[in-house]
Amino acid sequence: MNIDEKYRLVTIAQGFSYSPYSKFKVGALLIFNDDSYVMGCNIENASYPLGNCAERTAIFKALSDGKDLKNVKELVVIAPSPRAVSPCGACRQVMNELLPSDCIITLFNNKKEVLVLKNSDLLPYAFNEGDLNG
Ligand code: THU
């Protein structure tokens, strides 16, 4: 999938955002090795802490639909931030556990500025399953 198509699709996901409180619309697109994809958006609530980020929406949707997250090649995210969006710490923790460490993370803002990273770049020294085994 080329970069214009990724931008087009993630912008559609962003349009589905339910964010009446922050008015900060975020979209996510999980792309699999066969070029199939799952969209996500942020979903807020009047009880503020219950909101969910776009990245985790996409990941949880895909997993709960029975998709094998080992086959994810890329996560694309967009938000109307001044720089390419920086995923929050909670999402990084979930991405670290559930997406391949070499998965590409493509971050946009709505000026189409882009930053391309790897999942493992986003959370150095991550707490993980191995840390639970003392
Ligand atoms: N948000 C995301 O969906 N993803 C991010 O990477 C950053 C923040 C959402 C959470 C909340 O709905 C709004 O953006 C403002 O923080």
Image (cartoon, rainbow, N blue to C red):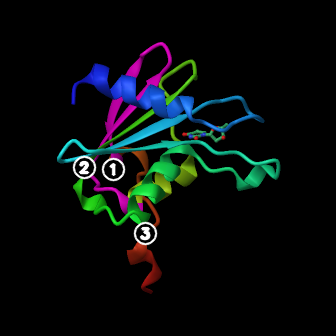
Q: Earlier in the sequence, mark 2 or mark 1?
A: 2
* 106 in magenta: yes
Whether disc 3's CB lies below 8 Å from ligand 1 is answered: no
Q: Earlier in the sequence, mark 2 or mark 3?
A: 2
Q: Quadrant of residue 77?
A: top left
Can you tell me which quadrant of the image ligand 1 is in? top right
Q: Earlier in the sequence, mark 3 or mark 1?
A: 1
Q: Amino acid at mark 3?
A: Asn
Cα–Cα gap, marks 2 and 1: 6 Å
Question: What residue does disc 2 label?
Answer: 102
* 116 in magenta: yes
Q: Quadrant of residue 107?
A: top left
Image location of residue 94, percent across then percent down:
47, 58
Nearer to the camera, 86 or 34? 34
Whether disc 2's CB lies below 8 Å from ligand 1 is answered: no
Cα–Cα gap, marks 3 and 1: 12 Å
- Residue projecting furthest to the left: 34
**On the rendered structure, is 101 left or right of 22?**
left
Image location of residue 30, percent across then percent down:
35, 45
The quarter of the picture where the C terminus appears is: bottom left
Q: Amino acid at mark 2?
A: Asp
Question: What residue does disc 1 label?
Answer: 120
- Residue projecting furthest to the bottom: 134
Question: What residue does disc 3 label?
Answer: 128
Give the residue displayed 82% in from the left and 52% down from the top. Answer: 47
Image location of residue 115, percent across then percent down:
37, 26
Residues drawn in magenta:
97-119
